[in-house]
Amino acid sequence: MNYYKSIIDTIGNTPLVRLNLVNKGIKGTILVKVEYFNPGNSVKDRMAIRMVEDAERDGSLKPGGTIIEGTSGNTGMGLALTAIAKGYSCVFTMADKQSQEKIDILRAVGAEVVVCPTNVLPDDPRSYYSVAKRLNRDIPNSFYPNQYDNPSNSLAHYETTGPEIWDQTKGKITHFAAGVGTGGTMSGIGKFLKEQKSEVVTVGIDTYGSVFKKYKETGIFDEKEVFPYLTEGIGEDILPENVDFSVIDHFVKVTDKDAAIMARRLAREEGLFVGWSCGSAVHGALEYARTTLTEDDVMVIILPDHGTRYLNKIYNDTWMKDHGFLERTYATARDIVHR
Ligand code: PMP
């Protein structure tokens, strides 16, 4: 019989798919790695299982323990699935800007979720970082993976996602782009690819309101760069240890609006029903590609998660209109009926 021992054994080996329409007028082959095929519907399953298994090996996570993490939702899902397979409990802290769907999904798979205010400084005792640390101190037999600084995060991508991309492109990849949040995805894959072929160009996708691009270009951590933004999962107001600036050649910043519009185009024009930061990644990567790529180039872009998590935001026309994001409306059967 051909079966997996548990759902977490299905993590990884996601497909690479060519873009056909949203990249019109841009030279080269643009491929996307569709990470929603992971069982938790996101790229973060890969590092969640790796952080847990490394902690089991080094003794920081013991049988029956509680996993506590600050998450924008996707890491929580990966940890929750891993916890179910291995018999742990989960408590997650999340900033209140994250989609309600993500909170509901985590509760559906048995995790406890503590919602914390978004617009406080990282070291404020109310921030989701601080609350996670406090819970870790107060809950006995608990383990705090700390995805921002935990090297197992980047390592998961160095050992799985990077080699998959290299094999799937038969070493023909010339450009790689990914959103940067904790930095694990970009840094792990970027390091692996550059070790295979140093000419591979890496493009990190950042948001307005985040510190990464300015830090890369000037070496200055500029607090003036920080302001509230809406896109979920990328951009930071801290410098996580998992962001390895030495393997990221360029940063491109993408607005909340451009990201939302591109995510919706990916759904309608490519049949890729993906998350908001996927729109950031593709918009930013194509902006870079438009002036840079030649016919023989092969660019790979990571699409981190699935569109269901954003149904009440970017896939909701009223929400889009309320935020001034809706540029194009599509005629519907209802319009014709009421004409
Ligand atoms: N997009 C989404 C939706 C995410 O949840 C994350 C994780 N924070 C990222 C992109 C960025 O990935 P990483 O943390 O590996 O930089």
Image: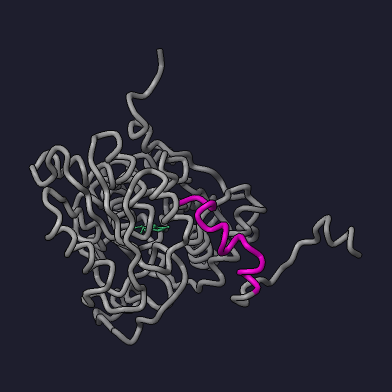
| Residue in the picture at 44% in, 45% down | 41
Residue 288 image point, x, y percent = 49, 66
The extreme right residue here reads 339
Q: Quadrant of the N terminus?
A: top left
Classify 10 as above or below 307: above
Q: Is residue 255 left or right of residue 331?
A: left
Examine the image and state in which quarter residue 129 appears.
bottom left
Residue 57 image point, x, y percent = 11, 39
How is the rendered protein coloured? Answer: one colour
| Residue in the picture at 31% in, 63% down | 248
The extreme top residue here reads 1
Residue 265 at least partly seen: yes
Residue 338 image point, x, y percent = 89, 63
| Residue in the picture at 30% in, 61% down | 93
- Which quadrant does ligand 1 occupy? bottom left
Q: Which sits in the foreground, 234 or 73?
A: 73
Residue 75 lies in the magenta stretch? no
The extreme left residue here reads 59
Classify 138 as above or below 291: above
Q: Quadrant of the C terminus?
A: bottom right
Residue 120 image point, x, y percent = 31, 78
Q: Which sits in the foreground, 237 or 179?
A: 237
Q: Which residues are magenta?
A: 305-321
